[in-house]
Amino acid sequence: MEITTIVILAVLAGLVFFVIGIYNRLVALKNRFQNAFAQIEVQLKRRYDLIPNLVETAKGYLKHERETLEAVTNARNTAMAGLKAAAADPGAAGAMAQLAGAEGALTSALGRLSVVMEAYPDLKASENMQQLSEELTSTENKVAFSRQAFNDAVMAYNTYKQSFPQVVLAPTFGHGPDASLLEFEDSAAIQAAPKISF
């Protein structure tokens, strides 16, 4: 065998291993952000499971606030549908936007319920309501951490996929559009500095 043939075969073998490495890294990063979304899904399902208990507990006290309770229930159902769509294709722009919008509506409905509950001291003092509120708050914190982990994983995937030479090879390997971040409507409020007035 000639030395030129050996060099050409070595370069081709190196190129093949390089391309295989890119493919494997793309798959690993995609699986990482899909797993991160699965963690969000677990926490959101827990949140959705707590809401009917919260509504049932509040019903006995809030007989005149039926509209508020129905708004919370409807917002929960819409958010569950948004989660189901997003779980089918984590990272898809449309699915992430639908979930973010539904979560914003649910957060708003829960905020209205909290305001209404302030007018009912017996409800606020209820041990069951306090426990449910604590669990809901804890779950909200877990959702925020899970969302951050998901967004970090999506960012790593997109950054790697957009780098050269991956940007050329990714579509060939079935990695089309970039994954979308999950940003809820409260993102701007969270990032804004708190305002204090006297």
Image (tube, rainbow, N blue to C red):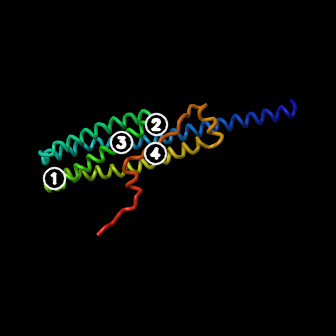
Q: If you read the primary sequence from the N terminus, does the residue marked by circle 2 or circle 1 appear first?
A: 2
Q: Which mark is residue 132?
A: none
SS at mark 2 in the image: loop
**How many angstroms separate mark 2 from mark 3 (CA)?**
14 Å
Residue sitting nearer the eye, 138 or 196: 196
Q: Nearer the viewer, mark 2 or mark 1?
A: 2
Q: Which residue is mark 4?
A: 150
Q: Residue furthest front?
A: 197
Q: If you read the primary sequence from the N terminus, does the residue marked by circle 1 or circle 4 appear first?
A: 1
Q: Nearer the viewer, mark 2 or mark 3?
A: 3
Inspect the image, locate mark 1, and give the three-letter code of the amino acid beneath it: Leu
SS at mark 3 in the image: helix
Inspect the image, locate mark 2, and give the three-letter code of the amino acid beneath it: Ala
Q: Which residue is mark 3?
A: 101
Q: Residue at left 29%, top 49%?
A: 136
Q: If you read the primary sequence from the N terminus, does the residue marked by circle 3 or circle 4 appear first?
A: 3
Residue 139 x/y as whole percent: 33, 49
| Residue 150 drawn above or below residue 198 | above
Q: Residue at left 40%, top 58%?
A: 192
Residue 49 x/y as whole percent: 28, 41
Q: Residue at left 49%, top 48%?
A: 152
Packing grade of label 3 (10 A; few <14, some 14-19, many >=20) is some
Q: Which residue is mark 2?
A: 92
Q: If you read the primary sequence from the N terminus, does the residue marked by circle 2 or circle 4 appear first?
A: 2
**How many angstroms separate mark 3 from mark 1 (CA)?**
29 Å
**How many angstroms separate mark 1 from mark 4 (CA)?**
36 Å
Q: Residue furthest bottom?
A: 198
For the N terminus, the quadrant is: top right
